[in-house]
Amino acid sequence: MRFKKEKEEITLEEIYREAREKEGPVIIPPQINHDYWQKLQTLVSTAAFGELLKEFLTYKQKAEENPGEFIEGNPILGAPFEGYYKPSEEEKRLSEIGMAIGLVIQSCHLQEECKKFLKEINKEQSLEIIEFIQYNFYYVDVVGSGRFIYPYKGIPLKISLKKRLEEILKSL
């Protein structure tokens, strides 16, 4: 006796591809509020360096006042077995601002710019060395459940802005 196939058998790859098409494009960064991310992009320039530093100080305070939380992971949905730390919006913004400051300083190629940056840093002594935690994220697609985004373990960074700028000035 032969059984009649009512449906063609579908492979897991085809199920996954179909689920991906329904989910839309994969977008990881930014993990912060999109409107704020757009605002931050306007500050990532040599002209707005002072404002960027002010944002850092503002969000350093806000991140201390509003810490994230530890979440127990659900491995079935791709989360780490041991759970993970979910940073608050303020902590994620501080991370993005800190990385933006590093990018602006690395882009300093003129003595006048570097001296201007040093002047801005000297206005606020707490900015000579900045400390923040860099958060990066990864996503997991779970067929039938959707896309889940989780943070990697945060990387504590300590950047001596003054020292770095002085090194750049010496090399120019």
Image: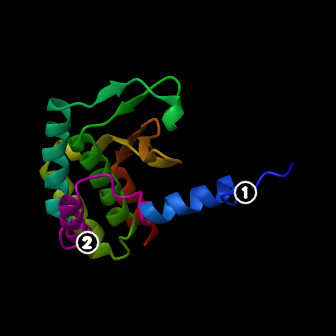
Identify which amino acid the numbered label 2 is placed on: Ser
Image quadrant in which the C terminus is located: bottom left
> Residue 102's quadrant in the figure?
bottom left
**Image x and y of residue 74, in percent:** 47, 28
Between residue 136 and residue 61, name the one nearer to us: 136
Mark 1 vs mark 2, foreground winner is 1
How many labels sit on residues?
Answer: 2
Between residue 151 and residue 100, name the one nearer to us: 151
Q: Which label number is shown at residue 45?
A: 2
Q: Which label number is shown at residue 70?
A: none
Identify which amino acid the numbered label 1 is placed on: Lys
Question: Image point 40% across, 41% down: which residue?
Answer: 157
Between residue 59 and residue 152, name the one nearer to us: 152
Question: Image point 45% across, 25% down: which residue?
Answer: 83
Q: Which residues are magenta?
A: 23-48
Between residue 59 and residue 110, name the one nearer to us: 59
Pointer 1 residue: 5
Q: Residue furthest front?
A: 1
Q: Is residue 98 above or below residue 107?
A: above
Q: Earlier in the sequence, mark 1 or mark 2?
A: 1
34 in the magenta segment: yes
Question: Could you tell me which secondary element the residue under label 1 belongs to?
Answer: loop
Q: Residues within 10 Å of mark 1 (few under 14, many from 20)?
A: few
Q: Residues within 10 Å of mark 2 (few under 14, many from 20)?
A: some
Q: Is residue 32 above or below residue 26?
A: above
Q: Is residue 26 visible?
A: no
Q: Along the horizontal axis of the image, is 40 left or right of 77?
A: left
Q: Work out how far the residue at label 1 is from the one at label 2, CA to CA, in angstroms.
A: 63 Å
Question: Image point 25% across, 49% down: which residue?
Answer: 93
Q: Is residue 144 visible?
A: yes
Contact flag, marks 1 and 2 (Cβ < 8 Å): no
**Image x and y of residue 22, in percent:** 44, 63
